[in-house]
Amino acid sequence: MKKMIQSLQQLGFSQYESQVYLALLQQSNVTGYELAKTSGVPASKIYAILNKLIERQFVLAIDSEPRKYVPVPPGDILSRLKGDYLETIENLSIKMDQLYARKEFTGNYIWNLLGRPLIMRKIQDFIVESAKHIYLSVWDEEVDELAVNMKQAHNRGIKIAIVHFGQKEFGIGNEYRHGREHQIRIERGGRRIVLIVDDKKMIIGHFTEDGNSNAVWTENKGLVLLAKDYIIHDIYTIRVLLKYGEEAMDIYTKI
């Protein structure tokens, strides 16, 4: 119940409004007095809360003596709220982008991301926004989470090149297995993910074994191309090894 109240508050309900509405879902067609007892809202405040919910069309009052109350079905409310929020977000997106004037000054910023969920969400957003091509360096642990977005990008005709650290593959585009996963994981103390989209933006993330994760993303052209070169370098190295074997690695790594 506590989590539902918190979720309703995120949708604009107050604490008391949430308690009253959820109480009505459990026991409908009740008086304000009865509702005060079941919801935990003070009797002195119950009618003010009910009037607000009626104004917002979340609760209906039945013309009876004494007056009783029933909830508007949750599906109707959530559908209406979803429509309102989507419309608001769409309008804000257009207007705020105009204010932001991103083409003029965002390119040189480097943005930090902390925590794997936020990093993966940003990567998924980048893949969805891709229009021409994708370069991706990825480990097994992240493949399943990105599979749907990557396959959708492939189906849209996006050109894709992928370096895999592990056994899993997406089954799309040009995919190359690195083959030195264990050694690299030890050297780096974790695993790295790199994504470049349309030569316009890139993200580099590092996931450590202890669960700490951080990443940076940018539209800085120099850094975007540097990250792209990093993946292309790995692809060339893999191709050389496939053709000439481990002896080529001994020669290649000598400085």
Image (spheres, rainbow, N blue to C red):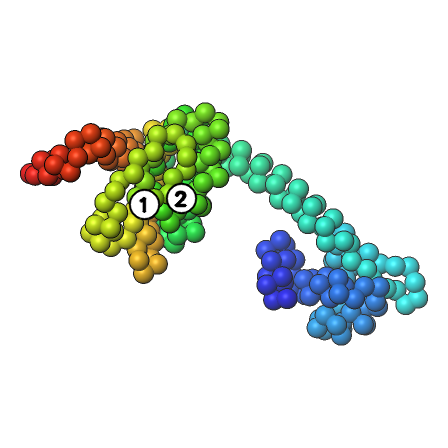
Name which residue lies at 41% across and 35% down: 171
Please determine whether, in this image, residue 211 is positioned above or below residue 230. Answer: below
Q: Secondary structure at mark 2?
A: helix
Q: Are marks 1 and 2 in contact (CB under 8 Å)?
A: yes
Does residue 9 appear in the picture of this structure?
no
- Residue 143 x %, y %: 40, 44
Write down the residue under mark 2: 143
Write down the residue under mark 1: 166
Q: Nearer the viewer, residue 93 or 139?
A: 139
Q: Secondary structure at mark 1?
A: loop
Which amino acid type is shown beneath numbered disc 2? Val
- Residue 37 x %, y %: 76, 74
Please determine whether, in this image, residue 5 is positioned above or below residue 150. Answer: below
Disc 1/disc 2 C-alpha distance (Å):
10 Å
Q: Residues within 10 Å of mark 2 (few under 14, many from 20)?
A: some
Name which residue lies at 72% across and 50% down: 75
Name which residue lies at 19% across and 34% down: 241
Name which residue lies at 39% across and 29% down: 173
Please determine whether, in this image, residue 51 is positioned above or below residue 31. Answer: above
